[in-house]
């Protein structure tokens, strides 16, 4: 398996849930808003023998050149959006789910992919409508024939891909394991991040 990070950059985020770009090489940590977190937005692609798997989709940003950042990051690594076969979501907070939909077309960003989402997470996000979720985007996704919803606390998404709902970061957050050829990749998303400088 090959793992490719797709960094969208560092951001500060506070209780408003607005993501403010933070340039690690220029900005001062002390200048962040009081109580804000410093986060790296980083979806990942895993290439297996049979699939190109996207783990989370980032913020769904448009870069300074007017390009959909996630598509650009994929192209920079020799991958077209149409090559992605599986999109697996750890949870649906907007910094992880913003790239589910192409911001220009308002259609699925990965038309040839199967989207794997936890049913309870989707229901919860649409029910509470908090600033952590982009419910308009999730309503568009909910109408897709490419959507596969899982309900169990643990299980398999596909052959060699398993998950467990931990609820550690958000109510229905899940972690993912990918296994192939004796290798195991663990994706914890927001359950275990930290930034040190």
Image (cartoon, helix red, strand yellow):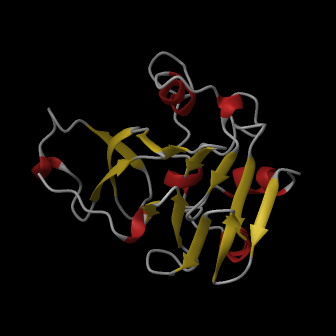
Please state if 173 lies on the left or on the right of 40 as rendered: right
The residue most toward the front is 181
Residue at point 79%, 61% (across, down): 148
Front one among 80 and 31: 80
Res 103 visible: no
Res 130 visible: yes
Front one among 149 and 120: 149
Please state if 109 lies on the left or on the right of 41 as rendered: right
**Residue 83 image position (x, y, % from top left):** 68, 31
**Residue 182 image position (x, y, % from top left):** 47, 60
**Residue 74 image position (x, y, % from top left):** 53, 29
Write down the quadrant of residue 5 in the picture: top left
Residue 149 in the image: above or below residue 114: below
Please state if 116 lies on the left or on the right of 194 as rendered: right
Residue at point 43%, 39% (across, down): 4
Residue 155 in the image: above or below residue 122: below
Residue at point 43%, 60% (across, down): 16
Please state if 191 lies on the left or on the right of 162 as rendered: left
Front one among 17 and 1: 1
The residue most toward the top is 65
**Residue 110 image position (x, y, % from top left):** 71, 38
Front one among 116 and 172: 116
Number of marks: 0
Write down the quadrant of residue 10 in the picture: top left
């Amino acid at each position: 398996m090959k793992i490719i990070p797709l960094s969208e950059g560092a951001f500060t985020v506070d209780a408003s849930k607005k993501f403010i770009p933070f340039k690690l090489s220029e900005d001062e940590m002390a200048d962040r808003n009081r109580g804000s977190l410093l986060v790296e937005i980083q979806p990942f692609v895993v290439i297996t023998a049979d699939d190109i798997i996207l783990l989370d989709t980032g913020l769904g940003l448009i870069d300074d050149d007017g390009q959909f950042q996630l598509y650009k990051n994929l192209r920079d690594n020799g991958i077209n959006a149409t090559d992605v076969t599986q999109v697996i979501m750890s949870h649906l907070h907007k910094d992880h789910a913003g790239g589910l939909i192409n911001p220009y077309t308002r259609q699925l960003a990965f038309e040839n992919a199967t989207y794997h989402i936890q049913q309870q997470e989707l229901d919860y996000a649409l029910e509470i409508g908090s600033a952590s979720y982009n419910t308009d985007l999730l309503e568009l996704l909910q109408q897709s024939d490419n959507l596969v919803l899982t309900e169990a606390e643990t299980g398999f998404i596909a052959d060699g891909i398993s998950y467990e709902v931990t609820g550690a970061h958000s109510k229905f957050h899940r972690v993912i394991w990918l296994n192939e050829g004796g290798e195991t990749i663990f994706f914890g998303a927001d359950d275990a991040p930290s930034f040190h400088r």
